[in-house]
Image (cartoon, rainbow, N blue to C red):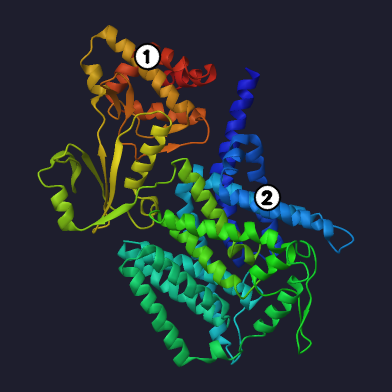
Amino acid sequence: MHSKRLNYGSNRVFDFLVLWILPVGLLLLLSALFFVGNRNVLHRIVYILFSVPTLFLLCMRPRELKDLLREPLALAFLAFSAWALISLLWSPEHSTDTDLFKRPLNTFMLFGGCGLLLHYRNELFKPIFFSAAVIALVVCLCNLVAFAKGFEPGMRMIGGLGALDNPLLSSHIFGFFCVYWLYVCMTTDRLRVLWFSLPALAVMAAAILATGSRTPLLALTLTTLWMGFVSRNRRAAVLISCMFLGAAALLIIAPELVTERGTSFRLEVWGLSLQRIAEHPWIGHSYDSELYLTLANTTELREPHSFALGVLYYVGIIGFIPWIFMLGWALYKSFKERAQPLFILASSLLAYGIGAGLTEGGGILSRPKEHWFLLWIPLAIIAGLSIAQRHRSLLRMPVRSIKNEAFDRLCSNAHVIEADGLGPKVLRLEDGSFLKLFRPRRWYTSGSFNPYSERFASNSEQLRTLGIPTPQILGLYRLSDASSAVSYTPLPGLTLRQALQSLDSSLRESLVERFGRFMAQLHERGVYFRSLHLGNVLLMDDGEFGLIDVADLRIYPSSLRYALRQRNLRHMQRYPQDRNWLFETHFEQLVKGYASVASPSATAKIREQVQSL
């Protein structure tokens, strides 16, 4: 009994950290630099709300760590970090800073945390990114207004609020969120979202130009080309055309923004860096070595202004191999899975980071700061998406945009199974498959971030991996009026409500007991079906139970807590016929079946819920 209580408590802690703490930690990681006083506050936020919880989660369930270690990006990062730490053996420094060991662990926890979050709570990923982007938008708009009021020739906008105190470093963050709004403009099918995203994109682009930095302009050019390459649609062509027109307009209206500072000594810096790299080309100068570059004008710099050159200097060619593998594999994986829009977003952010890293940066492993937005955050997101896809919690199936004429042809001679005041909801098509329609929700609701048709398909795939029969998904569609639809092969059989109506009392008792066992299996596997009732449970021809209409469903990391189990029963008690069969006439059979799978304490909570009525 004590071990069961301990296990129950452990599950509740695991669920709380994954479902609530990690989302808050990711949101603050993406947005805190805009409002915290200094970077040390950001470090503490990331440690407390993301890194430490992730480490705790991986220790609680070693299988999650094993799953993370199946990801090529995570393995490549471990190889890169291991070599960096090995390079401390030939460090010129007399003492080793313990912080050098924490940095790789902290970054690896970013990979692990993104993997856990995107596997167990991926429906929050888009709202988190949107919230962070809105925070960035508001801060940049305020900064631009203040900058315009006090503008003098030669001024560069630093960042104003928060911990942003350098024009170039600020431009990295502005560019990161500029890519996000560019992605929204490229992928949204909702006119209201597009009309909001276009001005947001313009504000972030203006913030980049106000910093006077040219690095993000190069990075945005590469990002635009990458997005056009992976999307290959009409919007991509328009995007690339606008990029060239914008570049031409910039060169005509304000050419000094590009040409005024020449090469900013980049060529000289790179030449000096290559000379230092040639001293130890294979093993590097060590992870914690110092780099001093003295230019012809006696200016001294401490970084090579290139991520690639920085990796070669610190850890040599041996360390460069896993580093370049991470970039190449992430782009390849994203291109391969480009049917999933989140891979387009993550790879576009990575393309931006690669472009910015051509002329900026040099440190290979750092604490959370602006450089994380260029490489580590995009790489961690791609690794997390890959893990989620392997668990089928992320859709592999593309969503097809379908015009009204093609949709009418698809639905010709279809039989309406279910309808409401707005029209048909479920259709049986000529080929025997079903088509379920989902009307558009308000733009700020969760349905706009995660369409219910995609939830239906994703939940169906996940349930099938758990051994629970659900409809086989055939296709996903996006309609011109912002509605969505999913086509599927229906399960053969009767609803449990229909089956109970046709049976005598003795057979009904047996079926109710089997349903109690099935309900307990759902709860023990973490399946919370909000709309669970006898009309959504199917008794199939082979005698097994299946679920239909699964859009309103969530799969938790652990078995359901008692409150959710009781809430499930309260929903079924709303239907008079279900209440009579399950909780009045045959309640003891229901409890008997439930107790054969669930723990005595969980069964007692179920009994308590019913008897309280």
Q: Nearer the viewer, residue 253 or 129?
A: 253
Q: Distance of mark 2 from mark 1, alpha carbons? A: 46 Å
- Residue 418 quadrant: top left
Q: Nearer the viewer, residue 394 or 190?
A: 394
**Snapshot quadrant of residue 54:** top right
What residue is shown at x 72% (from left), y 54% (from top)?
A: 83
The residue at 30%/40% (across/down) is 473
Circle 1 is placed at which residue position? 513
Residue 188 pos. (x, y %)? 35, 62
The image shows residue 177, relative to residue 445, as above or below, that is below
View extreme (right): residue: 94
Secondary structure beneath dot 2 equals: helix
In the figure, is residue 416 to the left or right of 385? left
Q: Amino acid at mark 1?
A: Glu
Label 1 secondary element:
helix
Specify the farthest residue to the top.
506
Residue shown at 56%/90% (left/top)? Answer: 259
- Label count reads 2
**Image quarter of the N terminus:** top right
Mark number displayed over residue 48: 2
Please give the label number shown on residue 490. Answer: none
Pinpoint residue 583: horizontal percent, then vertical percent. Answer: 36, 18
Residue 321 showing in the rendered view? yes
- Left or right of 548: which side holds 140? right
Visible in this render: residue 38? no
Query: 434 or 38, which lies in front?
Result: 434
Name the residue type under label 2: Ile
Residue 570 sits above or below residue 110 on the image = above
Q: Earlier in the sequence, mark 2 or mark 1?
A: 2
Q: Position of residue 508 (x, y in %)?
A: 28, 12
Residue 203, position as x, y percentages in the image: 47, 75
The residue carrying pointer 2 sits among few (fewer than 14), some (14 to 19) or many (20 or more) residues within 10 Å by Cα, namely: some
